[in-house]
Image: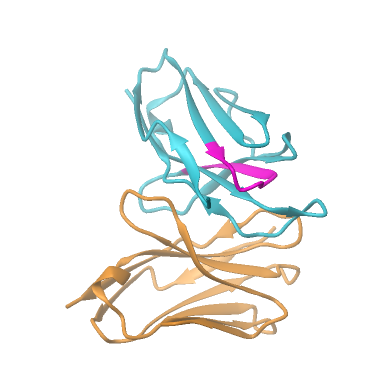
Chain colours: A cyan, B orange
Amino acid sequence: DTEVTQTPKHLVMGMTNKKSLKCEQHMGHRAMYWYKQKAKKPPELMFVYSYEKLSINESVPSRFSPECPNSSLLNLHLHALQPEDSALYLCASSLLSRGTNTGELFFGEGSRLTVL
Amino acid sequence: GENVEQHPSTLSVQEGDSAVIKCTYSDSASNYFPWYKQELGKGPQLIIDIRSNVGEKKDQRIAVTLNKTAKHFSLHITETQPEDSAVYFCAASGAGTALIFGKGTTLSVSS
């Protein structure tokens, strides 16, 4: 099983809504990531969790709130988003070897978010 | 921090031709250089990678070369096929650091 599964695939929400994106992997990877990707742009790193602890937060607005309930699951809670937050949100995971990132990222198919 | 430049931004080739995409990086501590292929509506998929202790790596029609002195690496696709059409991203990272992506190359292979 070499998959990173993201749900939902598509999400439309209003600026006052609260929603969550979910990500799951069963490869035993202990690093998990959220990336944001706008059309025709590369993925931009948002958050990194290592051993279920937040290790990198790339100055992301507080309306995005990550959560890592266990080593297989990663959530991104969304609240009071703006239309410019519309994008493809990608989850990824990687193996940690002696606490160091081996580098190989495995991406999910993404959740396409539209904020009205 | 690391900065990755990727060229060209678009590349059109005829089926059967070769395609080459080039990237440069700025941080000499970077030691891992993957290439991702992203098809429309899908997440990026790792197609090949190379580490700094290797100069070249090949996997069937795909090869990657690394020049550590010049800090550049390249993706070579031979005998291109229409299904190779996609956006390709190079990336770089060092030990314990997150991947930094290039801006991407849109490859179009026409039959």
Image-based side of A45 in relation to A80, left or right: right
Q: Position of residue B8 (x, y in %)?
A: 40, 73
Quadrant in the picture for the N terminus of chain B: bottom right
Query: Does B100 lie within the magenta span?
Result: no
Q: Position of residue B44 (x, y in %)?
A: 45, 55
Which of the pair A35/B1 is nearer the observer? A35
Q: Position of residue A87 (x, y in %)?
A: 40, 38
Which of the pair A49/A62 is nearer the observer? A49
Query: Does A34 lie within the magenta span?
Result: yes
Quadrant in the picture for the C terminus of chain B: bottom left
Question: Within the image, what quadrant is residue A31 found in?
Answer: top right
Which of the pair B75/A92 is nearer the observer? A92
Residue at the extreme top of the image, as rendered: A16
Relative to B49, residue A70 above or below: above
Residue at the extreme right of the image, as rendered: A98
- Tell me the magenta residue range: A24-36
Relative to A19, residue B87 above or below: below
Q: Residue at coordinates 32% horizontally, 48% vertically from top-left?
A: B41
Q: Residue at coordinates 72% horizontally, 35% vertically from top-left?
A: A52
The overriding secondary structure of the stretch rendered in magenta is strand
Question: Within the image, what quadrant is residue B62 found in?
Answer: bottom left
Relative to A55, residue A16 above or below: above
Question: Within the image, what quadrant is residue A88 found in?
Answer: top left
Q: Position of residue B79 (x, y in %)?
A: 32, 85
Image-based side of B53 in relation to A1, left or right: right
Residue at the extreme front of the image, as rendered: A1
Relative to B67, residue B88 above or below: above
Image-based side of B108 in relation to A66, left or right: left
Figure label count:
0
Which of the pair B39/A13 is nearer the observer? B39
Q: Residue at coordinates 37% horizontally, 50% vertically from top-left?
A: B42
